[in-house]
């Protein structure tokens, strides 16, 4: 498995986790983003994700490499779905293994936050009333609104 990938098939976190198993690590942290049934007060029926895949993979790989370097974790991976997703489908998975939990938590948070800000992925929401629309497209041009504190191994 590469460190960042897109998938049109359902995600399989139990398989991805095995790629992070390392006897030198005492911590594993993951994040799963699921399709929810509401956004900004509107009932959502399903989502559709599109991406500029070649650029997205390069940027995703950069983000994972930054997390490994910045937090000193042993390994990290991220997979994001593309295509049409139904309610409760898994849209994104991030996993990190590390000797210590603080670094694993911080790296996992860094990866998902940066993927949301920097990877060219577009989300279209399909609403129960038949309307649909692309959401948060303007955020692609904005800088992150949060800071990631550096954690030292402890």
Image: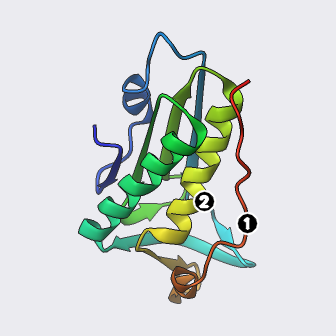
Q: Is residue 3 above or below residue 14?
A: below
Residue 20, percent from left and from top: 43, 26
Q: Which mark is residue 146?
A: 1
The answer to whether residue 46 of the structure is visible from this angle is: no
As drawn, which residue projects farthest toward the top? 23
Q: Is residue 83 above or below residue 89?
A: below
Whether residue 151 sits left or right of residue 74 in the image: it is right
Residue 146, percent from left and from top: 73, 66
Circle 2 residue: 113
> Which residue appears at 24% of the width and 67% of the height?
54
Considering the image in quadrants, where does the N terminus appear?
Answer: top left
Question: SS class of the residue under badge 1?
Answer: loop
Q: Residues within 10 Å of mark 1 (few under 14, many from 20)?
A: few
> Which residue appears at 51% of the width and 80% of the height?
140
As drawn, which residue projects farthest toward the left? 54
In which quadrant of the rendered view does residue 50 lie?
A: bottom left
> Which residue appears at 71% of the width and 73% of the height?
145
Disc 2 versus disc 1: distance between alpha carbons? 9 Å
Q: Are circles 2 and 1 on residues that touch, CB within 8 Å?
A: yes
**Which is closer to the viewer, label 2 or label 1?**
1
Q: Is residue 126 above or below residue 3?
A: below
In which quadrant of the rendered view does residue 99 lie?
A: top right
């Amino acid at each position: 498995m590469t460190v960042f990938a897109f998938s049109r098939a359902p995600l399989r976190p139990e398989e991805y986790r095995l790629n992070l198993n390392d006897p030198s690590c005492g911590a594993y942290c993951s994040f799963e983003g699921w399709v929810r049934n509401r956004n900004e007060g509107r009932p959502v029926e399903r989502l559709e994700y599109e991406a500029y895949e070649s650029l997205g993979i390069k940027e995703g790989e950069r983000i994972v490499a930054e997390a490994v370097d910045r937090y000193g974790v042993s390994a990290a991976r991220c997979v994001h779905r593309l295509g049409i997703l139904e309610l409760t489908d898994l849209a994104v998975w991030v996993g990190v293994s590390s000797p210590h939990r603080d670094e694993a938590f911080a790296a996992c948070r860094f990866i998902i936050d940066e993927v949301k800000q920097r990877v060219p992925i577009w989300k279209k929401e399909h609403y129960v009333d038949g309307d649909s629309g692309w959401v948060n497209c303007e955020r692609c041009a904005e800088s992150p609104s949060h800071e990631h504190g550096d954690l030292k191994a402890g």
